[in-house]
Image (tube, helix red, strand yellow):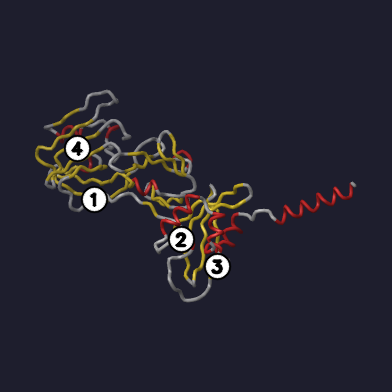
């Protein structure tokens, strides 16, 4: 009796091992290289409801069907019959990026896999990666006419004899809300002028943290209004991109509005003797930065220089 029990246990163990779900990478490789994605029965068994709806919506032929071409390149023809996966990269959170050859054409896709009761489920699939960049500033530093810009300079950059100011112009890093809403693990975002591959995305009380937020080497995006997000540094200051140098004339009646020495202090408004005010400035306050300084330009002339106390917006 004991021998029968032991044999039964062994048989069950072997059966379980034979029916064990493949690992994610093996599943992805088999799905593509064996063209399982062309089998509607396979799709209905291994795709989430969300993905099936997506495949149905993308199907642009008569009758019911699935847009199976989403799993491969967009090419209709190619230089060879080669059809294989060359690399599968684990992006974390169930996301993978596979690089494959389709009729001799190399492409990448991003795919998310989950495991439900031992069955692999394809939760979503999309293009391999996107590059998310700040919105264009719309400014031409060589032709600043009617605008307000963020700028950096020191008292030494004023040319009082000629009535000009040399300054470095910056733009606030704003991102389109649609780009942020559709970004995925594996995408790359340009943050603080450098590319950052996205490995995690977390929605928190203070905004959207990418790669665990700026305190951990990542970044934070905060809703800014007008259909945009703004990038933030670890100290909550806004991220700016340098646009270049500008050499502009000062209007003869230009105004300086300078914040006080504390957050509740009254700002100084200088309408005359601007040169004297700048030259006698406390040495601790000689730096005008993109974080706190706004320069108003009208008809190509600087009409106002405003410095605020609060460094974050």
The one nearer the camera, 298 or 289, is 298
Q: Are marks 3 and 4 in contact (CB under 8 Å)?
A: no
Left or right: residue 177 versus residue 154 is right
Residue 182 appears at what percent x and percent y? 40, 49
Mark 3 or 4 closer to N-term? Answer: 3
Q: Is residue 147 left or right of residue 32?
A: left
Q: Secondary structure at mark 1?
A: loop
Using the rendered view, name the quadrant where residue 35 is placed: bottom right
Tag count: 4
Distance of label 3 from label 1 (alpha carbons): 44 Å
User: How far is the residue under mark 4 from the one under mark 1?
Assistant: 21 Å
Whether the residues at callouts 3 and 2 have beta carbons within 8 Å, the answer is: no
Residue at mark 1 = 138
Residue lying farthest to the front in this orientation:
63
Per the image, label 3 sits on a secondary structure element best described as: strand
Q: Position of residue 193 (x, y in %)?
A: 37, 50
Query: Residue at horizontal 52%, vertical 50%?
Result: 48
Query: Where is mark 4, residue-wise?
Result: 305
Q: Are the two marked residues, 3 and 1, in contact with CB atoms closer than 8 angstroms?
A: no
- How dense is the environment of label 4, judged by Cα within 10 Å: few (below 14), some, or many (20 and up)? many
Q: Badges 4 and 1: C-beta atoms under 8 Å apart?
A: no
Q: Which residue is mark 2?
A: 65
Task: Indicate which disc, 3 or 1, sits on the residue closer to the N terminus.
Answer: 3
Dot label at residue 84 = 3
């Amino acid at each position: 009796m004991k021998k029968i029990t032991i044999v039964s246990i062994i048989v069950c163990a072997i059966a379980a091992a034979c029916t064990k779900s493949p690992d994610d990478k093996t599943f992805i490789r088999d799905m593509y290289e064996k063209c399982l994605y062309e089998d509607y029965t396979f799709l209905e068994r291994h795709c989430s409801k969300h993905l099936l709806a997506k495949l149905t919506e993308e199907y642009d032929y008569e009758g019911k069907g699935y847009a199976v071409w989403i799993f491969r390149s967009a090419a209709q023809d190619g230089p060879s019959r080669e059809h294989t996966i060359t690399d599968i990269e684990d992006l974390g959170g169930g996301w993978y990026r596979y690089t494959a050859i389709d009729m001799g054409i190399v492409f990448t896709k991003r795919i998310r896999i989950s495991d439900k009761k031992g069955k692999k489920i394809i939760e979503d699939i999309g293009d391999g990666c996107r590059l998310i960049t700040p919105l264009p500033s719309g400014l031409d530093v060589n032709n600043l006419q009617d605008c307000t810009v963020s700028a950096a300079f020191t008292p030494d950059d004023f040319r009082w004899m000629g009535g000009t100011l040399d300054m470095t112009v910056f733009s606030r890093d704003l991102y389109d809300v649609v780009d942020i809403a559709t970004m995925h693990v594996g995408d790359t975002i340009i943050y603080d002028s450098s590319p950052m591959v996205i490995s995690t995305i977390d929605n928190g009380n203070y905004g959207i943290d990418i790669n665990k937020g700026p305190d951990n080497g990542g970044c934070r995006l905060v809703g800014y209004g007008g259909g945009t997000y703004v990038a933030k540094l670890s100290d909550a200051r806004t991220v700016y991109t340098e646009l270049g140098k500008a050499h502009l004339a000062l209007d003869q009646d230009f105004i300086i509005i300078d914040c006080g020495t504390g957050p509740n202090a009254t700002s100084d408004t200088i309408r005359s003797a601007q040169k004297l005010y700048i030259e006698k400035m406390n040495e601790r306050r000689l730096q005008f930065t993109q974080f706190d300084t706004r320069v108003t330009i009208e008809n190509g002339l600087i009409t106002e220089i405003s410095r605020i106390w609060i460094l974050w917006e």
